[in-house]
C-alpha cells in the first residue's frame, strides 16, 4: 500500500482481550449431544419391538373389524324393470322419466345378531365428489348466514336460476342424493329409521345457518338430484349436510339414518326404496348398507391386515438381520484400521 | 482530464466538484421498493414464484387459495427486503456519522468548525492528532519541524511551508492508491519554485488516522465519493458455492420434471374430461367450452405442482449460512491471543465451499512465516559472520572488526543504518525506536544499532549516526526509491565530515551484482547469497560508490525533472536512477531470518492428507522458496519427493522445459511419491501466454507447485487458471500483494497479520494465524457442507412429498387438478411445520471435532460431493415418492367408505406427512442435542396445537376436524402405521448399508461412539516426517543450534519480484531429467 510505513500494529494488550469470543456451549457447538448409531443390537431390537407391538394391534383391529356386522346390497340394476335393463340409454331414459315407477323392494337377511344402533348407509361407486369442478362449487358464506344469499360466485354453473340466486347454490347441493329407503322386519314390523343426528353437530350449529331457507332450488332448466322443502331451514336439512361433506374417494358411503333396534340373526329385512338417483349415465353403482360400529368404526379390515403385515415384515427383517449378524459379524466390529483410497471412485 | 484545485479559493472550485458527502447507500427512500423488487426479481427462482402467484389469481385454475403462495412469497420478499434495508440503513448511519463529523478548516485565515460533508475541493483542512482524515488531502504543513506526519497506515513526507494561494494540477479521480502524479503551482510564481511535484507521498488519504503528530494541514483535492477510497469501493461479485450451483442444477431438473408431470397429467386430464367427465351430469360441463378450455387442466396441474420447488429453501439456506458464519466468528479455538484477533467470516454465504477446497494457493511471507525479521548473518568483503553461532551480532569476529574500525565493516554498517526509509523517534527516556516501512529495514537498522552504529535522528535532510559513542552526520541529498521493478533502493548522501557525496544501495543480488564495478569479483558474494538462500534466509546485497560533485549535480537536475513529470513518472524515474547506479562497489551481503509460524508444517501436512493441493506463490527467490517448502512439509526431500524445474528465458526454452516436465508427470504412475514443479515468474509469464494448454495440464497433474518471483497479478492469473479448470480454489495471504489473488479465488482467506489488514479486509474469511486454516477447512467446512447438503435435499424431499400426494390424489379425483389439502395447511406445511425442525440441523455433527481433525482424509469425501450429488438426490426423490405412496395409500384405505370425508382425509394425510418428516429428520440426525429434540418433537406438538386452534374456530374450514380425529383410535393407529411403514424400510436400508457397506465416515462414527481405537492407514498423501535429515544434506552449512521450531526461513524481500536472473544450478538432483518417478496422477476434470 502506498507509503505503508509506520505502524500502529495490533496493540497486544495482554490480560484483557475484548475481541476474544465469549464462551458458551452453543457458540462453540459443544452442546451435550447423544449420538445414536445403528448397531445391530439397536436395529434388531427396534424391529422386534415393532413386530411385537404391531401384530397384537393388528389382530385386535382385525377382530374388531370382524365383529362389525355389515349387510350390503347392490341395487342399481335390479331396481330397473326388466325391459329397461338392456342398454345404458334405456336405463337413463327410465330414470329421467318422472312418470316411471321407481319403487323397488330389496330383501336382506341378517347374518348375525346386530346390536343397535345400526347405521344405514347408501354407497355410491364411481362418483367423483372430489372432482375439482364439483368440490369447489358451493358457498360456505351463503350456507351460513341469510345475509349472504347472493354470494354465489363460486357456485357456477349452479348459481342463479332465472336471475335469482339459488339457495343452497352450487353443484354439490344441486346433485343431492334422493333415493329413499323404508324398512320392515320379518314382513310385518316396520322399522323406524331415525334421520336426526346423522349430520355433524358442528355443521348443524355453525356451517348451516338457522335462518337460511332453500330458495329457487331445483327450479332451473335441468333438474339434478333431490329437492328440499323450502320451509325447513338449512340447519335442519340433515341429508343435505351429509351430502355436502364431500367424499375424498370416488367410492363412498353416506349416512342415511340409524335403526335404534337390535336385529337378530336370520331376520329378514325388506327394504322398500325409491330409485330416483341417476348413476346410469356414468356407470355408477348404488348400494344400501346396514352396519354396526365399534371402536374401530365400520367394517374395515385394512388397518388390521396392514398392521399384521407390517409387524410380520418387521419380525422377518429382525430375523434376517440376526441371522446375517450371526453368520457374518459385520466389519464394524473391528474398526481398528481404516484404509483411505487414494482414488476414491465416484461415490 | 485534469482537475485544477485552487487552494483556499472558494469561488473558483466550489461548484465544480462534489462536496465531501460520502454515500455508500445502495437505495434511497424513494427508490428502495422498485429497486429492491427489481433486484429480487432478477433471480430466476423469484420470477418463477411470481408467475405461479399470478396464475393463482385466476380462480378458474387455482387449486388452492392464492394466499397459499402469495403469503410465503410476500413473507420471503419481506425478509430479503428487510435485510437489505437494514444493511442499507446501517450504511446510511455510518455515512451520516462520517459526514457530520466536525472538522476544522481554514477560511480566509480563520480556523472554522464545519461538518465533514461541507468540505469542498480546495479547502484547507486542519487535523489534530488522532483525527481521521476526512477526504483526500495534499499535505502542506504539519507540526513537525521536518514536515513529517504519521498516519496510522502510512508515514508521509510533506512540504514544510504553509502556503495559502496556489493551484494543484492533479489527475481526475481514480482508484489507484499508489499513484498521485500532480503538480503544485503557487501564486505568484516564485522564481525557483514555480512547479513543485507532488506524489502519493504528499497526500493524506481518506480514512487514515493522524498519529504522533500534533497537527497537520492539507488541501482537499478529492472529496466525497471521488476519493481514492471512494473510487475503489466496489460491490464485489457475489460468490456462488458449489453447493449452490448443485442446488440450482437440481432445481432445474425438478423444474423439467414438473413440466413433464404437468404435460402428462394435463393431457390425461383433458382426455378424461372429454371421455368421462362429460358423462357425469353432476359436474355439468358445458358442451361448448371457451377457446382456452384445453389449457385449464394443464395450468391447474402446473399450479398444483408448483410446490415441488420449495419456496422456503432460499430463506432457510440464508439463515443457516449466517449461523455457520457466526460459528466461525465465535470459535474460541480460532482466536489468536497474541494479536487479539478472532476469526471472522465476512462472507456468510460460502461456508460449505470450505469443505470443497481442492487447491490452496498460499503466499509465503507473513502467511507461512511470522514476518518478523531478525538479522542473522552477513558476509562482508568475503568474510562470513554468524556461521558458527547463527547470529552475526553475537559473532566475536564481527564485534572485533567493529571495535577495530575495520573500514569495510564500518561502511557496511553505515549503509545498514542509512540506506533506508526508517524514521527514528526518540522517546522521553532517551531510547530510540524505529518506524520502518518494511520489516527487513527494521531488522537491518536494529542490527546496526546493536553493532554500535545507531541511527539517532533524521531531521530535515540531516541524518545523525552514533558510532561507538561519537556522532557522525550525513546530509541526505536524494532518495532513489524502491520499486518492485528496480528491486533496489539507493540514497545519495553527503558525508558532513569530508564533504564527499556517496551513493548507497541495497537490493536483491540480481539487482545489485550486475551493476558492480567491472574490476570487482562478485563471485564470492553470489556464493554467499546462494549459501544463505539455501538456509532459507532472505538476502540483500549492499553496495556503494563515491560520486564526483559534477556528476551528482548533473544527475540531480535530471532527477528533479523526472520527479515532476505527470506522465509515466515511475518509468522516467527508474531510467534516471539507472544512470547513477552503476560501477558499484559491493560491500557485502546481509541475511535475515524469518520464522515459520507455529503449526504451519502440521497444518500443511494435515491438509495435504485431506487431499488438498498446495501451491506456494511467492515473490521470493527459487532456492529460498524451495527451502521453505521443505521445512513446512510442502514438498518432500529426496528420495520421497522430486522437484521438476521449469525455466528458460525464451519461449522455446520454456516450452521445452515445460514439455519435459509434463512428460515426466504424465508417464509416472501413482506411486507414493511427491512430485512438485517449480516455476519462476519469467517462465510462468511465457507459459501462461504461449503454452497455456500445456501449463494447464501440468497444473492439474501436479499436487504441489512452487511459483517464485511472481507478481500480484500473476498470482491472480494462477487462481484464474485453476478456476477455469473448475477446481475450488482457496487463496490465503496477508499482504496487499495478495489482495487480487484473494478476491479472485473461490474462497479468499486473509491473515490479519503484520502487513496490515488489507488482505483481511478483502477476504471472505480472516484468521489470525495460518494454523487456524485447518480448523476452518476441516471442522467448519466439513460441518457446513454436511448441514447444507442435508438441509437442501430435505427441503426438496418435503416439497416433493406433499406434491406427490397431490398427484396421487389427482388419479382418484378424475385427473381434474383438485387439491387434497386446503390452502392453510399447504402454506403452513411449507413455511412452518417442515422448515423449523430441519433448521436445527445446523447443530448436527456427524463426527466429533476431534475425529475430524484426526482423520483429515474425510475431507476428500466432501470433494467427491459425497452428500449432495444427483444420486443422493435421487435417493431423496425416491424416498419422497415412497413416503407419498405410503401416506396416500394408508390414509385413503384407513379412511374409506363412510369415513371418506375430504377434510378429514386431508388432515390424516397431512398429519401422516408431519409424523413421517419428524422421524426422517430424527433418522438423519447424527447427534441429538436438547435443541434438536425440542425442535423435532416440539414441532410435532406444535402441529397439533395449531390445528386444534384452527379446529376451534367456527369460521375456519377445518372446524372441529382435528378434535374429531384425535378422538378416534383409528386415527392414531393410522399415524403409527404410516410411521412404521414409511420409516421401517428406510431404517432397514440404512442399517444394511451402514453395517455391510460402511463408508469411512460410518466406520469412524462407530469407532468414536463405541470407543474403539482407530488408525488411519494409507494416507491420501503419505508424508515423510524425517525431512530434517534430508534438509541437512542439502545445506552447505547447518548451524548446530538449530532446532526444529526455530527454523530459519526466507521471506519475500521487498526486492524480489519479477524475473529471475538466470538458471539456478545447484539443484541438479531436482532437475527434471528424464528420470521417471511417481506422481499423483490426476485426471482432467470433465464437466
Image (cartoon, helix red, strand yellow):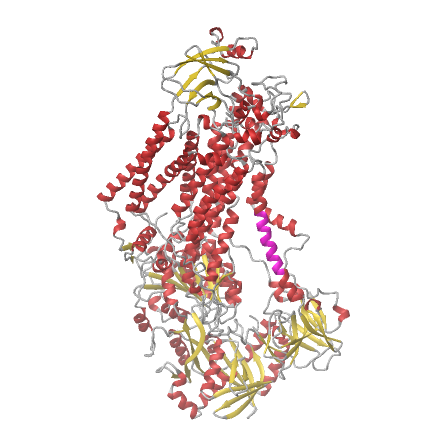
Q: Name the residue at 38% across, 64% down.
A: B603
Residue with the most extreme top position: A83
Q: Residue furthest right?
A: B11
Q: Residue at x 64, y 65 (%)?
A: B97
Of residue B760 and residue B94, the one placed in the foreground of this image is B94
Where residue B938 appears, x then y in whole percent? 45, 47
What is the x, y in percent for residue B890?
41, 32
Q: In terms of depth relative to the viewer, which is nearer, B914 or B328? A: B914
**Looking at the picture, does residue B714 appear above or below residue B218?**
above
Please state, as top left, top right, bottom left or bottom right, where the N terminus of chain B lies in the image. bottom right
Residue B1053 part of the magenta segment: no
Give the image location of residue B155, x and y in percent.
Answer: 58, 76
Q: Can residue B705 be seen here?
A: yes
The dominant secondary structure in magenta is helix
Examine the rendering and report whether any part of residue B515 can be seen.
no
Image position of B567 (left or right of B967)? right
- Count how many numbered circles sit on residues in the image: 0
Residue B1084 vs B21, above or below: the answer is above
Which region is colored magenta? B76-91
Relative to the observer, which residue lies in front, A66 or A276? A66
**Residue A261, relative to residue B708: is it above or below?**
above
Q: Given the current orientation, which residue lies at the most extreme left position?
A: A327
Provide residue B693's location: percent of width, then percent of height. Answer: 45, 55
Rendered residue at 56%/30% (across/down): A205
- Residue B87 included in the magenta stretch of the image: yes
Vertical placement of residue B611 versus B286, above or below: below
Amino acid at each position: 500500500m502506498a507509503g505503508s510505513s509506520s505502524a500502529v500494529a495490533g496493540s497486544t494488550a495482554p490480560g484483557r482481550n475484548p475481541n476474544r469470543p465469549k464462551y458458551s456451549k452453543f457458540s462453540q457447538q459443544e452442546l451435550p449431544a447423544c449420538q445414536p448409531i445403528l448397531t445391530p443390537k439397536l436395529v434388531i431390537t427396534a424391529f422386534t419391538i415393532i413386530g411385537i407391538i404391531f401384530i397384537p394391534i393388528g389382530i385386535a383391529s382385525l377382530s374388531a373389524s370382524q365383529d362389525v356386522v355389515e349387510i350390503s346390497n347392490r341395487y342399481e340394476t335390479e331396481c330397473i324393470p326388466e325391459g329397461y335393463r338392456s342398454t345404458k340409454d334405456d336405463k337413463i331414459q327410465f330414470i329421467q322419466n318422472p312418470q316411471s315407477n321407481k319403487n323397488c323392494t330389496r330383501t336382506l337377511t341378517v347374518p348375525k345378531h346386530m346390536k343397535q344402533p345400526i347405521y344405514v348407509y347408501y354407497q355410491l361407486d364411481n362418483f367423483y365428489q372430489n372432482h375439482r369442478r364439483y368440490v369447489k362449487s358451493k358457498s360456505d358464506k351463503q350456507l351460513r348466514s341469510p345475509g349472504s344469499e347472493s354470494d354465489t360466485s363460486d357456485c357456477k354453473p349452479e348459481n342463479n336460476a332465472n336471475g335469482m340466486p339459488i339457495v343452497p347454490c352450487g353443484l354439490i347441493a344441486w346433485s343431492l342424493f334422493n333415493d329413499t329407503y323404508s324398512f320392515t322386519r320379518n314382513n310385518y314390523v316396520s322399522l323406524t329409521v331415525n334421520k336426526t343426528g346423522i349430520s355433524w353437530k358442528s355443521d348443524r350449529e355453525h356451517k348451516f345457518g338457522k335462518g337460511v331457507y332453500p330458495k329457487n332450488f331445483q327450479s332451473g332448466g335441468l333438474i339434478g338430484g333431490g329437492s328440499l322443502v323450502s320451509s325447513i331451514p338449512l340447519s335442519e336439512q340433515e341429508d343435505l349436510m351429509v351430502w355436502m361433506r364431500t367424499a375424498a374417494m370416488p367410492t363412498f358411503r353416506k349416512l342415511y339414518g340409524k335403526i335404534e333396534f337390535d336385529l337378530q340373526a336370520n331376520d329378514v329385512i325388506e327394504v322398500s326404496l325409491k330409485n330416483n338417483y341417476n348413476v346410469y349415465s356414468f356407470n355408477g353403482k348404488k348400494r344400501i348398507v346396514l352396519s354396526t360400529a365399534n371402536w374401530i368404526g365400520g367394517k374395515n379390515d385394512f388397518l388390521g391386515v396392514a398392521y399384521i403385515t407390517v409387524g410380520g415384515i418387521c419380525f422377518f427383517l429382525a430375523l434376517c438381520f440376526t441371522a446375517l449378524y450371526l453368520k457374518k459379524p459385520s466389519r464394524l466390529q473391528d474398526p481398528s484400521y481404516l484404509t483411505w483410497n487414494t482414488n476414491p471412485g465416484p461415490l | 482530464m485534469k482537475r485544477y484545485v485552487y487552494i483556499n479559493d472558494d469561488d473558483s472550485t466550489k461548484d465544480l466538484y462534489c462536496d465531501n458527502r460520502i454515500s455508500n447507500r445502495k437505495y434511497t427512500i424513494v427508490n428502495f421498493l422498485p429497486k429492491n423488487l427489481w433486484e429480487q426479481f432478477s433471480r430466476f427462482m423469484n420470477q418463477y414464484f411470481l408467475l405461479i402467484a399470478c396464475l393463482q389469481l385466476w380462480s378458474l385454475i387455482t387449486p388452492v387459495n392464492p394466499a397459499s403462495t402469495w403469503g410465503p412469497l410476500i413473507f420471503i420478499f419481506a425478509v430479503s427486503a428487510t435485510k437489505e434495508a437494514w444493511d442499507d440503513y446501517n450504511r446510511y448511519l455510518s455515512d451520516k456519522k462520517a459526514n457530520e463529523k466536525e472538522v476544522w478548516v481554514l477560511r480566509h485565515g480563520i480556523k472554522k468548525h464545519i461538518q465533514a460533508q461541507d468540505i469542498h475541493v480546495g479547502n484547507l483542512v486542519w487535523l489534530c492528532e488522532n483525527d481521521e482524515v476526512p477526504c483526500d488531502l495534499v499535505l502542506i504543513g504539519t507540526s513537525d519541524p521536518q514536515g513529517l506526519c504519521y498516519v496510522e497506515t502510512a508515514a508521509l513526507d510533506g512540504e514544510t511551508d504553509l502556503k495559502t494561494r496556489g493551484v494543484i494540477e492533479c489527475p481526475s479521480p481514480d482508484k489507484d492508491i499508489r499513484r498521485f502524479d500532480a503538480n503544485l503551482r503557487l501564486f505568484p510564481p516564485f522564481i525557483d519554485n514555480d512547479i513543485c511535484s507532488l506524489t502519493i507521498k504528499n497526500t493524506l488519504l481518506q480514512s487514515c488516522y493522524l498519529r504522533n503528530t500534533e497537527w497537520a494541514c492539507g488541501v482537499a483535492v478529492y472529496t466525497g465519493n471521488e476519493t481514492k477510497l471512494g473510487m475503489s469501493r466496489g460491490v464485489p461479485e457475489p460468490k456462488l458455492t458449489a453447493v449452490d450451483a448443485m442446488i440450482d442444477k437440481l432445481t432445474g431438473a425438478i423444474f423439467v420434471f414438473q413440466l413433464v408431470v404437468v404435460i402428462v397429467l394435463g393431457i390425461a386430464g383433458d382426455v378424461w374430461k372429454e371421455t368421462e367427465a362429460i358423462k357425469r351430469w353432476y359436474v355439468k360441463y358445458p358442451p361448448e367450452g371457451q377457446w382456452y378450455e384445453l389449457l385449464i387442466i394443464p395450468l391447474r396441474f402446473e399450479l398444483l405442482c408448483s410446490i415441488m420447488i420449495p419456496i422456503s429453501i432460499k430463506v432457510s439456506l440464508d439463515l443457516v449460512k449466517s449461523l455457520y458464519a457466526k460459528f466461525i466468528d465465535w470459535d474460541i479455538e480460532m482466536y489468536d491471543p497474541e494479536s487479539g484477533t478472532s476469526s471472522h467470516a465476512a462472507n456468510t454465504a460460502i461456508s460449505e465451499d470450505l469443505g470443497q477446497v481442492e487447491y490452496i494457493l498460499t503466499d509465503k511471507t507473513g502467511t507461512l512465516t511470522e514476518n518478523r525479521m531478525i538479522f542473522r548473518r552477513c558476509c562482508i568483503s568475503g568474510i562470513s559472520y554468524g556461521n558458527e553461532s547463527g547470529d552475526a551480532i553475537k559473532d566475536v569476529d564481527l564485534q572485533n572488526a567493529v571495535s577495530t574500525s575495520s573500514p569495510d565493516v564500518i561502511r557496511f554498517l553505515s549503509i545498514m543504518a542509512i540506506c533506508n526509509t526508517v524514521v527514528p523517534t526518540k522517546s522521553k527516556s532517551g531510547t530510540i525506536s524505529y518506524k520502518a516501512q518494511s520489516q527487513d529495514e527494521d531488522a537491518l537498522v536494529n542490527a546496526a544499532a546493536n553493532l554500535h552504529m545507531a541511527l539517532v535522528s533524521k531531521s530535515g535532510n540531516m541524518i545523525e549516526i552514533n558510532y561507538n559513542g561519537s556522532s557522525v552526520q550525513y546530509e541526505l541529498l536524494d532518495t532513489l526509491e524502491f520499486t518492485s521493478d528496480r528491486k533496489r533502493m539507493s540514497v545519495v548522501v553527503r558525508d558532513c565530515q569530508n564533504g564527499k557525496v556517496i551513493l548507497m544501495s541495497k537490493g536483491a543480488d540480481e539487482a545489485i551484482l550486475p551493476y558492480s564495478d567491472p574490476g570487482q569479483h562478485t563471485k564470492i558474494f553470489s556464493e554467499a547469497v546462494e549459501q544463505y538462500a539455501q538456509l532459507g534466509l532472505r538476502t540483500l546485497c549492499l553496495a556503494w560508490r563515491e560520486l564526483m560533485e559534477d556528476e551528482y549535480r548533473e544527475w540531480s537536475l535530471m532527477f528533479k525533472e523526472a520527479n515532476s513529470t505527470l506522465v509515466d513518472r515511475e518509468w522516467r524515474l527508474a531510467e534516471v536512477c539507472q544512470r547513477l547506479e552503476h560501477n558499484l562497489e559491493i560491500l557485502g551481503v546481509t541475511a535475515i531470518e524469518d520464522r515459520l509460524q507455529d503449526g504451519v508444517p502440521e497444518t500443511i501436512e494435515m491438509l495435504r492428507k485431506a487431499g488438498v493441493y498446495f501451491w506456494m506463490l511467492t515473490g521470493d527467490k527459487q532456492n529460498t522458496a524451495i527451502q521453505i517448502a521443505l521445512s513446512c512439509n510442502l514438498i518432500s526431500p529426496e528420495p520421497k519427493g522430486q522437484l521438476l524445474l521449469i525455466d528458460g528465458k525464451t519461449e522455446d526454452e520454456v516450452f521445452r522445459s515445460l514439455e519435459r516436465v509434463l512428460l515426466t508427470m504424465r508417464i509416472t504412475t501413482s506411486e507414493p511419491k511427491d512430485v512438485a514443479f517449480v516455476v519462476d515468474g519469467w517462465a510462468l509469464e511465457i507459459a501462461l501466454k504461449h503454452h497455456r494448454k500445456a501449463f494447464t495440464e501440468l497444473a492439474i497433474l501436479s499436487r504441489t507447485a512452487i511459483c517464485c518471483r511472481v507478481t500480484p497479478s500473476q498470482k491472480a492469473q494462477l487462481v484464474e487458471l485453476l478456476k477455469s479448470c473448475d477446481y475450488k480454489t482457496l487463496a490465503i495471504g496477508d499482504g496487499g500483494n495478495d489482495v487480487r489473488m484473494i478476491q479472485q479465488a473461490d474462497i479468499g482467506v486473509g491473515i490479519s497479520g503484520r502487513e496490515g489488514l488489507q488482505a483481511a479486509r478483502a477476504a471472505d474469511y480472516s484468521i489470525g494465524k495460518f494454523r487456524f486454516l485447518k480448523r476452518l477447512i476441516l471442522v467448519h467446512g466439513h460441518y457446513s457442507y454436511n448441514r447444507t447438503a442435508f438441509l437442501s435435499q430435505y427441503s426438496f424431499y418435503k416439497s416433493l412429498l406433499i406434491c406427490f400426494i397431490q398427484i396421487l390424489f389427482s388419479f382418484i379425483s378424475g385427473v381434474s387438478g383438485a387439491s387434497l389439502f386446503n390452502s392453510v395447511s399447504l402454506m403452513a406445511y411449507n413455511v412452518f411445520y417442515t422448515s423449523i425442525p430441519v433448521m436445527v440441523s445446523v447443530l448436527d455433527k456427524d463426527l466429533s471435532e476431534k475425529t475430524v481433525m484426526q482423520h483429515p482424509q474425510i475431507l476428500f469425501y466432501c470433494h467427491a460431493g459425497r452428500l449432495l450429488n444427483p444420486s443422493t438426490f435421487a435417493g431423496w426423490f425416491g424416498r419422497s415418492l415412497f413416503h407419498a405412496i405410503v401416506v396416500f395409500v394408508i390414509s385413503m384405505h384407513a379412511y374409506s367408505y363412510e369415513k371418506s370425508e375430504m377434510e378429514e382425509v386431508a388432515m390424516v394425510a397431512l398429519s401422516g406427512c408431519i409424523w413421517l418428516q419428524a422421524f426422517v429428520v430424527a433418522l438423519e440426525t447424527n447427534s441429538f442435542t436438547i435443541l434438536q429434540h425440542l425442535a423435532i418433537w416440539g414441532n410435532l406438538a406444535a402441529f397439533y396445537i395449531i390445528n386444534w386452534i384452527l379446529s376451534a374456530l367456527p369460521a375456519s374450514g377445518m372446524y372441529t376436524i382435528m378434535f374429531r380425529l384425535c378422538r378416534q383410535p383409528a386415527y392414531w393407529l393410522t399415524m403409527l402405521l404410516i410411521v412404521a411403514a414409511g420409516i421401517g424400510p428406510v431404517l432397514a436400508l440404512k442399517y444394511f448399508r451402514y453395517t455391510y457397506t460402511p463408508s469411512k465416515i460410518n466406520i469412524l462414527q462407530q469407532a468414536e461412539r463405541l470407543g474403539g481405537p482407530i488408525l488411519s492407514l494409507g494416507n491420501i498423501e503419505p508424508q515423510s516426517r524425517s525431512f530434517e535429515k534430508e534438509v541437512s544434506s542439502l545445506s552447505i552449512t547447518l548451524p548446530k543450534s538449530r532446532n526444529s521450531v526455530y527454523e530459519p526461513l526466507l521471506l519475500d524481500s521487498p526486492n524480489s519480484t519479477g524475473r529471475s536472473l538466470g538458471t539456478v544450478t545447484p539443484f541438479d538432483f531436482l532437475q527434471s531429467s528424464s528420470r521417471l518417478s511417481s506422481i499423483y496422477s490426476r485426471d482432467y476434470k470433465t464437466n
